[in-house]
Amino acid sequence: MKNIFNNIKAYFVNINRYKAATTQESTFVILDTETTGLNVNEGHRIVSIAATKIKNLKITNEILDELVNPERQISERSIEIHHITQEQVQNKPVFKELDDKIYNFLENAVLVGHNLEFDIKFIIKSGPYTTIAHRVKNIVTIDTIYLAAGIYPHFKSYELSFLCKTLKIQTEDQKRHSAIGDSVITARLFLHLLEEASKKNINTIGGILNLCQQGKQIQILMKDFNKIH
């Protein structure tokens, strides 16, 4: 019981340390996945995982970009979207074999994504006993859907393409619905949102999380959620 209490205490100390940090001094990992299908509870799994890193409010050259053997068939509908075929992944590592690589890339960073809950669910299901699955359950996360809604509460949509078009975020040089392409695009969107937050004198992770919490209250999100990813 004492160990459990100490672990909980350490968790909250760690979270509070992150919240006090400024966005300028923080490292962010912007993550995206592509999957065999949309419903994780039907056994669908990750076929591609990618991440981009932001330091000092700039996108770095550090990237993670991996195809994953899902150990199951990819649905035809998913292939139409991300164009990853069975042949491309059949000889690739299974998710648990990428555990150390993904964990090391993510270590000491704030995790960011667009509809991030989707990616986290798939990480946990694709590698239920991996270090990274445990890590994403106990990490500071920022969802750009909620952050955008907190900053722009009257937008009619928070779908990634709509946000980028409306906010004039560059997308033409990236492939949509590829994990690495969407990661880079989301990173650009995130930097724009941080800049807008800074204009409101919001420059800490705690302040950004408060904006995200406000964004969760936006009712229009409920209409968009099934088509956002």
Image (cartoon, rainbow, N blue to C red):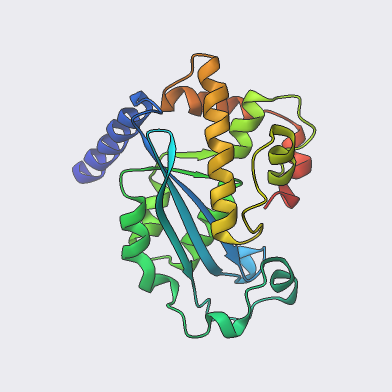
Residue placed most toward the observer, 136 or 109: 109
Q: Residue at x 72, y 37 (%)?
A: 221
Residue 216 occupies which quadrant of the picture? top right
Residue placed most toward the observer, 70 or 3: 70
Residue 219: x percent and y percent?
75, 31
Q: Is residue 207 above or below residue 98?
A: above
Residue 80 occupies which quadrant of the picture? bottom right
Please say whether residue 52 is visible from this viewpoint.
Answer: yes
> Quadrant where the N terminus lies?
top left
Please say whether residue 216 is visible from this viewpoint.
Answer: no
Q: Is residue 109 above or below residue 135?
A: above
Residue placed most toward the observer, 9 or 54: 54
Q: Residue at x 26, y 44 (%)?
A: 4
Residue placed most toward the observer, 146 or 172: 172
Q: Image check: 51 left or right of 20? A: right
Q: Is residue 104 above or below residue 93?
A: above
